[in-house]
């Protein structure tokens, strides 16, 4: 799913992942009345905006995202918010991005699609493939010679992955050491609002 920065400006946050996102220069809605736009959102509008923010952030289509949330609602083993976070964060494309192997989730999705990523010793080309604690991923040895990964070593030297991931910067390898913590995500996004949106 390709995004332009008008989407970021409309949603009130950068979801495209680009370093030079237009929202950072113009933090107001697009259009001639963007700066003057002051109308408040209804409860439904706020729920819709929260849903759109997270959906676009992870580059998912509506059906995919709805299925993740409905599956989280239907299960009873963990709180719904934590289940939503786990479903999104444990995707292969997201973990590839979180390990610093790609600058954006969209780029990570392309890297996976093109067969550059190995999971537990086997090539996986499905971005939505869900990883488990203990799974190991790495950039394929033949792929490391490509121009796409030439500067990756220098980039990883300055990069610190999330605490639930382990990164071998020299060998371009990573490991899932625990489930992602939902606290930071819940502070940034109103997951209860998203759950309410799909529970109507």
Image (tube, grey):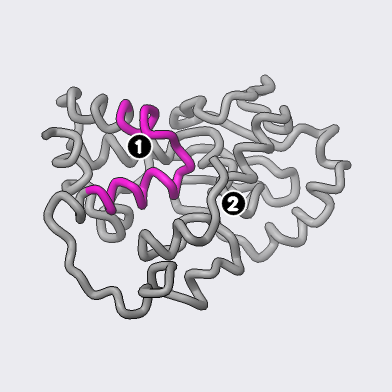
> Label 1 near label 2: C-beta < 8 Å?
no
Q: Residues within 10 Å of mark 2 (few under 14, many from 20)?
A: many
- Mark seen at residue 104: 2
- Mark seen at residue 1: none
Q: Residue at x 31, y 57 (%)?
A: 184
Residue 81 or 77: which is nearer the viewer? 81
Q: Position of residue 118 (x, y in %)?
A: 67, 28
**Image quarter hosting the C terminus:** top left
Q: Residue at x 20, y 32 (%)?
A: 78
**Image quarter hosting the N terminus:** top right
Look at the image and give the residue range highlighted in magenta: 48-67
Residue 141 or 56: which is nearer the viewer? 56
- Mark nearer the viewer, 2 or 1: 2
Q: Position of residue 137 (x, y in %)?
A: 62, 33
Residue 105 belongs to the span the image colors magenta: no
Magenta stretch: dominant SS?
A: helix
Q: Residue at x 81, y 36 (%)?
A: 143
Residue 196 or 72: which is nearer the viewer? 196
Question: Looking at the image, which residue sits at the far front?
Answer: 32
Q: Residue at x 72, y 30 (%)?
A: 114
- In the displayed structure, 175 sits above or below 135; it is below
Question: Looking at the image, which residue sits at the far top?
Answer: 122
- In the displayed structure, 87 sits above or below 20; it is above
The numbered mark, 2 or 1, whose residue comes first in the sequence reads: 1
- Mark seen at residue 86: 1
Residue 29 or 198: which is nearer the viewer? 29
C-alpha separation, residue under disc 2 versus residue under disc 1: 19 Å
């Amino acid at each position: 799913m390709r995004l332009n920065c008008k989407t970021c400006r409309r949603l009130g946050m950068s979801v495209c992942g680009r370093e030079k996102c237009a929202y950072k220069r113009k933090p107001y809605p697009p259009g001639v009345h963007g700066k003057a736009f002051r109308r408040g959102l209804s409860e439904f509008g706020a729920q819709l905006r929260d849903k759109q923010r997270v959906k676009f952030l992870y580059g998912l289509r509506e059906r995919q995202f709805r299925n993740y949330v409905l599956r989280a609602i239907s299960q009873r083993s963990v709180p719904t918010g934590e289940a939503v976070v786990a479903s999104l964060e444990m995707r292969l494309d997201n973990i590839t991005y979180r390990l610093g192997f790609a600058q954006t989730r969209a780029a990570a999705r392309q890297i996976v699609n093109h067969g550059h990523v190995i999971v537990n010793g086997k090539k996986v080309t499905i971005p939505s493939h869900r990883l488990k604690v203990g799974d190991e991923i790495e950039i394929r040895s033949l792929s490391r010679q490509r121009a796409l990964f030439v500067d990756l070593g220098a980039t990883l030297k300055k990069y610190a992955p999330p605490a639930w991931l382990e990164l071998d910067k020299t060998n371009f390898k990573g490991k899932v050491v625990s489930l992602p913590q939902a606290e930071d995500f819940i502070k940034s996004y109103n997951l209860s609002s998203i759950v309410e949106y799909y529970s109507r």
